[in-house]
Image (tube, coloured by chain):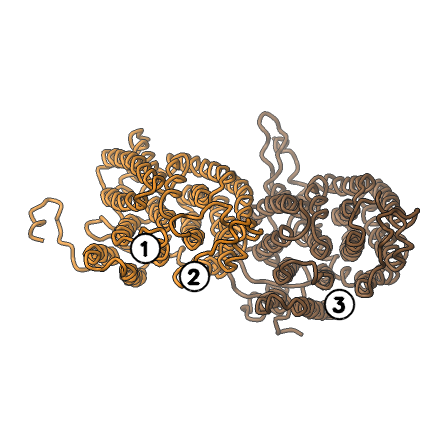
Amino acid sequence: MSLLAGLPLATATPGGGDLIGLLPEVIAAGGFLLLMLADLVVPPERRTWLAAFSALVLLGALGVSLWGWFDAGAAGRTVYFGAYAYDRLSAFTNCVILVTSLLSVTISPGYLNRRGLHFGEYYALLMAATVGMMLLAGAASLMVIFLAIELLSISLYILSGFSRNEERSQEAAVKYLLLGSFASAFLLFGMALVYGETGHTQLVQIASALNRSGPLDPLLVGGVILVFVGFAFKVSAAPFHFWTPDVYQGAPTSVTAFMSVATKVAAFAVLIRVFDYAFAADYSRWSPVVIAVAIISMVVGNLAALTQTSVKRMLAYSGIAQAGYILIGVAVGVGNPLGVQGALYYLAAYALTNLGAFAVVTVMTRRGEDMDSYDHLRGLWFRRPYVAVAMGFFLLSLGGFPLTAGFFGKFLVFAAAIEGHNVALAMWGIATSAVSIFYYLRVAILMFQRPAEEERAYQWPRTGLAGGSVLLATAAGTLILGTAVPLVFTVAQLAQAGTIPGAT
Amino acid sequence: MSGFPWLTVVLVLPVGGAILLQMLPRRASAAIKGWTVLIATAEAVLVAMVVYQVATGPAQGACPGGPASRCAAISLMPLPMHLQEQANWITSIGASYHLGVDGVSAWILALNAGVFLLGALVISRQTTERLKLFCGLLLITETATTGVLLSLDLLLFYLFWEGMLVPLYFLLAFYGNENRVRATLKFVIYTAAGSLLMLLAIIYLHFATPGTGPSGSFDLETLLQHPIGAQTGVPLPFTSIPTLTPMMWAFLAFAVAFAIKLPIVPFHTWLPDLYESAPTPALVFFAGVVSKMGAYGLIRFAITLFSGPVHQLQPLLVALAVLSIIYGALMALSERDIKRIVAYASISHLGFIALGIFSLDQNGINGAIIQIVNHGIIIAGLFLVAGMIEARTGTRDIREMAGLEKRMPWLYALFLVITLGSLGLPGTNSFVGEVTIMLGAFQYFWLLAVLAGGGVVLAAWYMLRLHQGLMHDPETPRVSAVRDIRLREGLVLAPLAALVIFLGVYPHPIGAVSSQAVPAYVTVADVSQAQASVSFVPVGSDR
């Protein structure tokens, strides 16, 4: 404290109450440091202990985040001089991120052992990425947003190149790094422009400055659009998606499972906070861009997914399309609570479903190589009937069939679009959904067809307790979100209502 | 019978049976089939009790568990429902778990249960691969179709409507001939696209309906009590010609979704391919029930919620129905494959049902409901016969078969009754339905009844051509070694043939139940007709 006292920015000393707002992140960051140290002493054959320790830390952070939901209250507040929002939106997304992180850690030891990639740094990096994502979801200042994005990105760059002997993994890491740095530059430049126009880095003050500002300023619009481009890269929306298929395919599947969902949840949380709340006054200028990106994502993602022959690539393109659907909620979310609620519901649904689908790919992995081609999936029903049923369920959910989480996600964002008098946007969503049914069901049908001769001889790996429990948890979550809708929808409503900065 | 949630039991019994089915060992094929038949029989008995209740009991809301104010609202409803059940579901957007049955759905529900029982009976234990999966999917489909018939909440209805596709997709894609995957994908994408459009229209209704509270409502009865007022279309650029109103677009979305399922020409192209490739047990309930869901949806939702647009677009709708009758009949005449002939005949007959509905006349709708039940019985019988013949001769090409009469006298007799029913001979059940429909059509426009009558003549032509070609004429080599149907098969077909005749001479049970409900539907459909016709005035004309 004495060090900070002389600096001009420390105009007030943060009280003990501020630390509570960051407690989940602090716990996870502490876990990250301990994991780094523990890796030095834990013998290589006992690395599963690291996974168990990670899970413990994540559970602790999850507990604190749940408590924070109630502690933050309906209104929420900012901590550390308006740098971080301690509100229900951040509590909600923290919980989703921590659950996905926990499930990813659970499937990791079995998968990494089979791939021969079981190193201690993996868990430390995963924890660091989780910290970055949680910070991003709660960030209430442009600087924190940038730092959080860099923290999560750098961790993920390393993780996607984690398979050091495999060219595809190396290529994925380099591609992700180069394009990611490019996107960060866009983001930073956009932030600079916004700062230059408003004179603030804190979202609350930016929101009120925008409310006051009069005529249209091209620099501000440019800044807002550049910030959006930076986020759109992180959520892998088209046309900023070119890294997605290669990185998703090249990275180890447990990493892909984690980053395909958790990154999206965090980046969408900040997208909602910045655009639907802080930049709400500028709505009429940025919404055409968001709508256009949403439509392009839905069209490009769904059409490109049609021709894939690898499950990981198909899920990558499907993820691009799903980003488009969630963007519908963001695009119509100003002055229309259903938009943000729908987007949040969709995020929770997508997180569980997509993680489950990738978990299926991890439990199918043989020694040393991923088994993600459609041919490998053929006949899964005959070898692992429960895994096949779970995968079928996830695919139906991604396709938006009723009684699954995906249906209500789509239903809510389409409803939000119609409520926002943008029927055309909903029509685009409907048309592309109809296309998507084709490729999801094509994979579903493959699993129930007779396997090829050479595949029959192979002894498939056991699903294992960890893999089985993850599949069970994600499938159960998908079913619950598809039937007992009020359970999570009420939470999404409360999160939407208590977001900082409040709707203007 | 009130108080106890009978409809919920009817709804969950098949799916519960499907879950318990998974406990049985895979090899115990007799137990698997026996259990499936048992569940389907129990369901049929329960449904019979429900139909009896509808036929005799007073219409009222039971609403166990619902707040008293909801009960009061239910008694005001325009459609007389029986055995209602209501429970909270997604309160914040006004969706509830609301079930009910009335004279329109009662007999379709009975048809549903009966046809599924039939489908369960004709599963072949010997030749069906993965019998447990097949039986499970069959029972799950039954729950979905039952849910479609019972739901009084649009969102709940949509869940079952779209959910029905999932078990059907697996059933049709796993079983059947080599073209099945392609045909099934065509069917699923076709219907899913239509359904998604309907979802948009449902959401639109939810937001556009005034006075349903802060959260809006998906409840059919609430929506009917708060009709959307007159709307005007936006004038097209540079003209004073108005475009369709939003309500008309919403109606078209519903109509297309139902027309694809029914199907009405030109939305029928999935049907012949699918019927040709599907296995017989699946086909029996698919053709018998699933396609009727479209007709049911038109009566229950399209003409009540969209009374204005229905009247405005009536000429178009009726014309498409007549086109279906004629086109289906002509295509049936040109086909050589038994299953494809029956498929096109089915399109023609379903055109009659659509004609009855769109005549918006009491007789027409009454006849449509009677004909839904009749056609379900006849089409199930025809596909069973086609399946039996195909299994024995190994072909479906009618040019390769002749003279089956001598080889299969029992099949000949039963097939004859069903054929005569199909072509609408007086004294069979179709005659009753078609005449009632034509009464309604005549009220609307006499020429329609004449054209539809032409369809009946064509029906006589193609059905007799099929029957004679297969049964009479000198024997071909294909049929020389054919054996007659076994007793078990005869016992499946005989009740259908008996029903064809029984309902032909005594149609009262069906007609009495449906006609107690139909006037309410016609009234609802007429209420805003005058109001809606105002809205069709060109926008520019008031200047």
Q: Quadrant of residue A284?
A: top left
User: Residue B440 bears which disc, if any?
Assistant: none
- Residue at the spot of label 1: A94
Chain with orange colouring: A
**Whole-Å distance between the Cαs marked 1 and 2?**
24 Å
Same chain for labels 1 and 2? Say yes or no.
yes
Residues B252 and A268: in front is A268
Secondary structure found at label 3 = helix
> Which callout, 1 or 2, points at the residue further toward the start of the chain?
1
Chain designation of label 1: A
Q: Amino acid at mark 3?
A: Ala
Q: Position of residue B220 (x, y in %)?
A: 61, 56
Same chain for labels 3 and 1? Say yes or no.
no
Horizontally, residue A375 falls left or right of residue A124, namely right
Q: Position of residue B81 (x, y in %)?
A: 67, 63
Q: Is residue A155 visible?
A: yes
User: Residue B55 bears which disc, if any?
Assistant: 3
Residues A218 and A121: in front is A121
Chain with brown colouring: B
Q: Residues within 10 Å of mark 3 (few under 14, many from 20)?
A: many
- Residue at the spot of label 2: A468
Horizontally, residue B426 falls left or right of residue B368, namely right
Q: Amino acid at mark 1?
A: Asn
Q: Is residue A189 above or below residue B439?
A: above
Chain designation of label 2: A
Q: Is residue A462 above or below residue B354?
A: below
Q: Is residue A16 above or below residue A287?
A: below
